[in-house]
Image (spheres, rainbow, N blue to C red):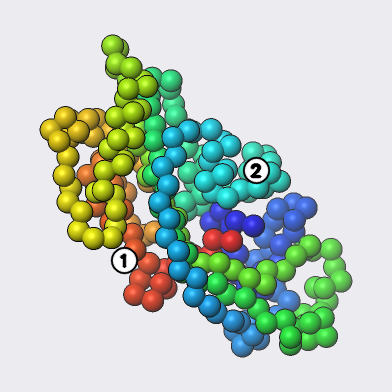
Amino acid sequence: MVTLGRPLHLGTLYNMRSDKIITAVTLWDPEILANNTILRKQPFTGFEIIAEDSLQNKAHALGIDASLKLSLLGGLIRVSGSAKYAEDYQRTNHETRLTLKYSTTTHMETLSMKHLGKGNLNHPDLHDIDLATHVVTGVLYGAEAFFIFDRTVSNGESKKEISGSLRAVFDNPIFKIDGEAKFDLTEQEKKFVDKLRCKFYGDFRLNANPNTFAEAVKTYRQLPSLLGENNENAVPKK
């Protein structure tokens, strides 16, 4: 289950019927949880271009399953961070949109249940009340970011051609983090990207959100370093 920016940690109680995370209490004390936590590295980095702006595409990009999507539509879930992307839609049909998704995972934390069974609960009274349906025994850490680029389609312009030009810009190696790719655009491409508006939704702490294409490229290249030297800024993802 994806967190969607919600405070999901080892030992957290969760009610699947109401899609609510219970943060006030846990079955075990923090020290017990820490002593029974197994950590393993799980490095991964992905790059994806999203051309459609439908709820179905947004749900797929965020890893939301059918039941969680219904809860999101019903207002049962309050999202934050990169998951705010799900709430952003095009305002008019006179725009074309393309979204760049950056995702990374760093490590996985799991509970060793050998010494954490029913007979070893610090708060056994919680086990028998109808408070939660599940307890979190594994958490994947990482971060995601969505860069949304909108471009107004003027009279006389073809929305299909504008979309194609936008896609061509995104295929430019300037978005590759590895190596020293230069910000190398033709004069025509520069005029095109100057008309782009950018919005950012992410799990990263930025001094300021990018508003232009150039600012977005600069921010995108900085994302790995924003996780911290020891990935201490990674957040629970699922």
Identify the residue at the far top of this view: 156
As helix, strand or loop, the secondary structure at mark 2 comes to: helix
Q: Residue at x 33, y 17 (%)?
A: 158
Reading the image, the residue beneath label 2 is 69
**Residue 91 appears in which quarter of the rendering?**
top left
Q: CA distance from mark 1 to mark 2?
A: 32 Å
- Please give the label number shown on residue 225: 1
Q: Specify whether 46 is left or right of 222.
A: right
As helix, strand or loop, the secondary structure at mark 1 comes to: helix
Identify the residue at the far right of this view: 128
Q: Nearer the viewer, residue 122 or 67?
A: 67
What amino acid is labelled 2 in the image? Lys
What amino acid is labelled 1 in the image? Ser
Q: Residue at x 26, y 48 (%)?
A: 173
Question: How many tags in the picture?
Answer: 2
Does residue 76 appear in the picture of this structure?
no
- Please give the label number shown on residue 26: none
Residue 75, horizontal then vertical, whole percent: 64, 42
Residue 206, horizontal then vertical, whole percent: 33, 57
